[in-house]
Image (cartoon, helix red, strand yellow):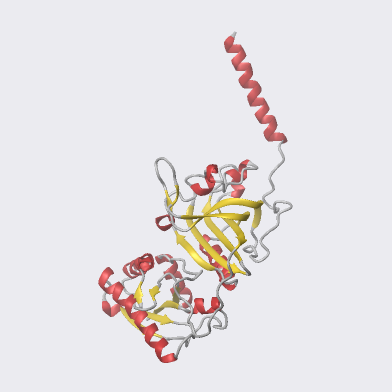
């Protein structure tokens, strides 16, 4: 008798589940989620679909400033800011065959032009952290969209590849604003149409009124430590840029301004340059330093030459690259990639380039 009761209950449960699946409204992955209010200052990547949206007039949230740490008891960001303010979260699906590097570079360019400053950036699980997608897929962290099964299954466990993070900050008219971007190729086990595509998670936070910044002084040169385009390019990406344009533009090699010495954060990019040279033993490179137009030409030539030489010596001494495969030179501000009229442009012009010899 008990067996019959249990079997009847199970059959009824299966029937109810089947009925719910067949009658539940379909989630249209070809249309934007209705009634969403996107960030007016940050246009979406071309041909993306907005599948998730929520906004809170007042909320508390965490914005990462360091990599994800996977721990036995509790996984979380190694370092993070806890912010209170207006929070907007957006979730986009990029078109098929678009990679996360394309997406991130697009947003970094937009944010640079808006004057945002980088707080943290990374590429790949080595630098962003193993299982970094847990920040979304584990609902306890408060980032996951939970209104339907497709949104809950974005960044399905074990499917995330080539993750990239950019976190930026801007102080404007007495208000602090932050943007946290996460882009990664992912699968969606709930719906194949939402899988094998880059998913783009964006969280924007506007805090309460903050103290106004001090007025800028025309006699003070801007800091060059921080740039919103300083993503590490891996060896494959370096090779592709060199093939396509004959040069690779690097923003992830930063220096201490006073000593012109390479900062430790540059190690990740130096490793990838060394790997490229190991993979292509016939390749020889010029390492070219560039500056913005702040300061005299003579001092900028000296500074850019010193920085290029520092990169060359690091590759020779620390990564055993043959000296005859490298040459260093400085161009000062004689080859800008954009106008130096605005701070964002000057930040983009301050860079190291690799040029095929």
Q: Is residue 348 above or below residue 127?
A: below
In which image quadrant can residue 341 be found?
bottom right
Horizontally, residue 75 falls left or right of residue 42, namely left
Residue at the spot 65% in from the left edge and 66% down from the top edge: 41
One can see residue 190 in this view: yes
**What is the residue that sits farthest to the top in this orientation?**
1
Q: Position of residue 331 (x, y in %)?
A: 42, 86
325 or 133, nearer to the observer: 133
Q: Position of residue 13 (x, y in %)?
A: 64, 24
In which image quadrant can residue 236 be found?
bottom left
226 or 321, nearer to the observer: 226
Q: Position of residue 76 (x, y in %)?
A: 46, 48
349 or 242, nearer to the observer: 349
Residue at the spot 58% in from the left edge and 54% down from the top edge: 84
Where's the C terminus, which quadrant?
bottom left
One can see residue 320 in this view: no
How many marks overall?
0
265 or 186, nearer to the observer: 265
Q: Position of residue 10 (x, y in %)?
A: 61, 21
Q: Is residue 194 above or below residue 120?
A: above
Residue at the spot 67% in from the left edge and 25% down from the top edge: 15
Residue at the spot 50% in from the left edge and 85% down from the top edge: 219
In which image quadrant can residue 152 be found?
top right
Q: Is residue 24 above or below residue 257?
A: above
Where's the N terminus, which quadrant?
top right
Q: Is residue 243 above or below residue 177?
A: below
């Amino acid at each position: 008798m008990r067996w019959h009761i249990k079997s009847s209950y199970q059959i009824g449960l299966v029937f109810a589940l089947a009925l719910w699946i067949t009658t539940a409204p379909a989630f249209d992955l070809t249309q934007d989620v209705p009634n969403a209010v996107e960030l007016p200052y940050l246009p979406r990547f071309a041909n993306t679909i907005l599948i998730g949206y929520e906004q809170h007039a007042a909320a508390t949230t965490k914005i990462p400033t360091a990599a994800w740490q996977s721990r036995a008891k509790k996984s979380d960001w190694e370092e993070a800011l806890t912010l209170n303010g207006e929070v907007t979260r957006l979730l986009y699906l990029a078109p098929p065959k678009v990679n996360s590097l394309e997406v991130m570079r697009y947003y970094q360019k937009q944010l640079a032009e808006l004057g945002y400053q980088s707080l943290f950036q990374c590429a790949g699980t080595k630098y962003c952290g193993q299982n970094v997608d847990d920040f979304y897929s584990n609902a306890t962290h408060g980032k996951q969209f939970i209104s339907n099964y497709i949104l809950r299954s974005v960044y399905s466990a074990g499917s995330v590849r080539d993750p990239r993070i950019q976190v930026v900050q801007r102080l404007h008219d007495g208000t602090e604003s932050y943007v946290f971007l996460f882009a990664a190729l992912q699968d969606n086990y709930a719906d194949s149409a939402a899988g094998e595509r880059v998913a783009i998670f964006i969280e924007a936070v506007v805090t309460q009124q903050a103290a106004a910044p001090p007025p800028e002084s025309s006699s003070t040169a801007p800091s060059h430590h921080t740039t919103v385009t300083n993503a590490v390019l891996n060896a494959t990406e370096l090779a592709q840029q060199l093939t396509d344009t004959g040069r690779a533009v690097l923003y992830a090699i930063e220096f201490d301004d006073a000593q012109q010495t390479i900062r430790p954060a540059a190690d990740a990019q130096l490793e990838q340059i060394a790997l490229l040279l190991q993979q292509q033993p016939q390749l020889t490179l010029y390492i070219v330093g560039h500056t913005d137009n702040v300061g005299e030409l003579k001092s900028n030539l000296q500074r850019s030459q010193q920085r290029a030489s520092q990169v060359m010596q690091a590759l020779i001494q620390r990564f055993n690259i043959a000296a005859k495969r490298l040459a260093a030179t400085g161009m000062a501000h004689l080859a800008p990639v954009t106008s130096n009229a605005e701070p964002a442009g000057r930040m983009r012009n301050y860079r190291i380039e690799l040029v095929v010899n």
